[in-house]
Amino acid sequence: MSEGVEWVLHTCVNLSWVGRPVRSARLATFYDLPPAYLNKQLQSLVRAGVLTSVSGPKGGFTLARDPASISLLDVVTAIEGTDPAFRCAGILAAGPWGDKEADYAATCVISTAMRKAELAWRKELARQTIADVCASVERRAPGEPERTRRWLS
């Protein structure tokens, strides 16, 4: 996974606490990130319907939906895409007992195990929301939302 996933997950949490548009440059400064690269990642979230981009002097980025309706999988797929992490190349076909006609992506034990693991990972990401992450952070660091609001204001 690219580092952009981490950046935008933290940014979504911060935006949920702020509750108003924040410019990408300000969001980038919060974690000392490259502004142009973060902005590119944020635009991906806009295209995916996770964020809204507001133009004008009080513009910036804001969550497009309630944090409870934005899953971690929504964010990950907006940045990384929906392609599977593991792609079976069917190397068994080239082995000494290989069958050039076999569908190894469907029958290979390794391919099956990798698909099963990825499905479990995606289900877990789909189960957790930005609101869930916010609640966990708030339990561990109760002052974090207010500190973040003040800093980004």
Image (tube, rainbow, N blue to C red):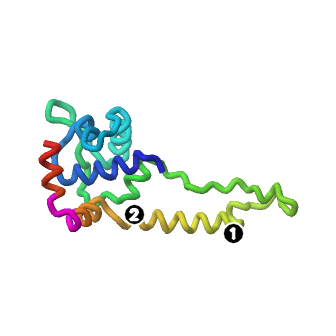
Q: Position of residue 73 (x, y in %)?
A: 40, 58
Q: Position of residue 117 (x, y in %)?
A: 55, 67
Frontmost residue, 110 versus 47: 110
Q: Is residue 126 rendered magenta in the image?
A: no
- Determine whether the residue tagged by mark 2 lies in a helix, strand or loop: helix
> Would you say the residues marked 2 and 1 are in contact, meaning their CB atoms lie under 8 Å apart?
no
Q: What is the three-letter code of the residue carrying label 1?
A: Val
Compared to residue 109, the image places residue 150 above or below, namely above
Compared to residue 18, the image places residue 36 above or below, namely above
Q: Who's the residue at 13% across and 54% down the image?
A: 146
Q: Position of residue 27 (x, y in %)?
A: 25, 41
Q: Position of residue 92 (x, y in %)?
A: 78, 59
Q: Quadrant of the C terminus?
A: top left
State the residue position of label 1: 109
Residue 60's mark? none
Q: What is the three-letter code of the residue carrying label 2?
A: Ala
Q: Residues within 10 Å of mark 1 (few under 14, many from 20)?
A: few
Frontmost residue, 65 versus 59: 59
Frontmost residue, 71 versus 14: 14
Q: Who's the residue at 41% across and 63% down the image?
A: 125
- Determine whether the residue tagged by mark 1 lies in a helix, strand or loop: helix
State the residue position of label 2: 126
Q: Residues within 10 Å of mark 2 (few under 14, many from 20)?
A: some
Region rendered in magenta: 138-143
Q: How many marks?
A: 2
Q: 24 left or right of 19?
A: right
